[in-house]
Amino acid sequence: MEKRIDDIIGIPRRLHNCRLSNFKEHNESSKESLKLAKEAANNRSSVLLLFARKPEGGILYSGTGTGKTHLGLGILFDILEHKYIDRNGVLIPEYCRFITADGYARDFHDAGYNRDELRRRLLIAFDDGSGQVKTIMLDRLGEEDKTGIQCIKELIYKLHDDEVQMIITSGLSEKELRIRYGHQIWRRLSDDVIVISMYGKSYKQRS
Ligand SMILES: Nc1ncnc2c1ncn2[C@@H]1O[C@H](COP(=O)(O)OP(=O)(O)OP(=O)(O)O)[C@@H](O)[C@H]1O
Ligand SMILES: [Mg+2]
């Protein structure tokens, strides 16, 4: 059976249908966020989608389910469909990857902190200069455990140095990201990047 593009680049099945076209504008934040996401997709910019902790009516919503991953994937699919197509109209998925911060940190740990092995597995040709992966979606930044922070930092340094287009989602706020990863990483995360701060209730619990 032929493999679907989503499987090849590592997107979990339950997220296969996340597109910009089916992202609903159900409040002010989703409306503004979709606008910025389209801009990012058009300009091929790196994007950081995070949850803005805005107290509304005294309630501090949890960031979960606000649509960060959906919107990030919408951008990724848009890029896949418009950019990574060869002369014969065939998609070249090798250039894109979807990873989660916690999954990446866990793999790193399981590979005995062997960078070469992990890079080989992810097809991220960091060191040979071929820059094979050109767009990466790093989902759930901040969900890795404490021991995984250092390898996520190394990953971000590398992606930034290699000018890999990054689509990053995080349930952390800007301030929390700064505290967790430090200013040097924050500078790389926010350098030449469209930052989309989403707020509101979980999409599925909206009224
Ligand atoms: N504006 C929207 N329009 C349509 N579907 C949405 C929208 N926002 C969220 N969803 C759907 O709601 C579910 C949860 O969204 P998603 O996983 O993107 O949230 P999240 O912000 O990444 O949450 P978490 O912080 O837990 O990772 C998904 O099935 C997604 O497709
Ligand atoms: Mg998510």
Image: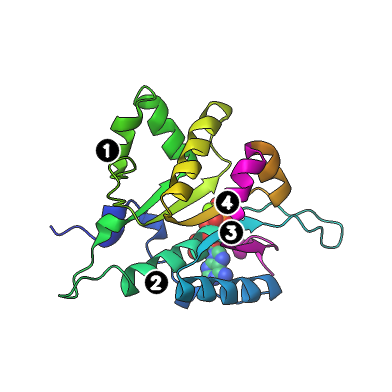
Label 4 Cα crowd, 10 Å radius (few <14 / some 14-19 / many 20+)? many
First reached walking from the N terminus: tag 3 or tag 2? 3
The magenta segment: 181-207
Q: Residue at x 31, y 54 (%)?
A: 9
Check residue 30 for magenta coloring: no
The label shown at residue 78 is: 2
Q: Determine the secondary structure under disc 1.
A: helix
Q: CB of residue at label 2: within 8 Å of ligand 1? A: no
Q: Residue at x 62, y 49 (%)?
A: 187
Q: Are marks 1 and 3 in contact (CB under 8 Å)?
A: no
First reached walking from the N terminus: tag 2 or tag 4? 2
First reached walking from the N terminus: tag 4 or tag 3? 3
Residue 195 lies, with reference to residue 138, above or below; the image says below
Instruction: Locate the C terminus by quadrant.
Output: bottom right
Q: Determine the secondary structure under disc 3.
A: strand
For the residues marked 4 and 1, what is the alpha-carbon distance in whole angstroms? Answer: 24 Å
Q: CB of residue at label 3: within 8 Å of ligand 1? A: yes
Label 3 Cα crowd, 10 Å radius (few <14 / some 14-19 / many 20+)? many
Q: On the image, which quarter does residue 106 sit in?
A: top left
The label shown at residue 120 is: 1
First reached walking from the N terminus: tag 4 or tag 1? 1
Q: CB of residue at label 1: within 8 Å of ligand 2? A: no
The label shown at residue 49 is: 3
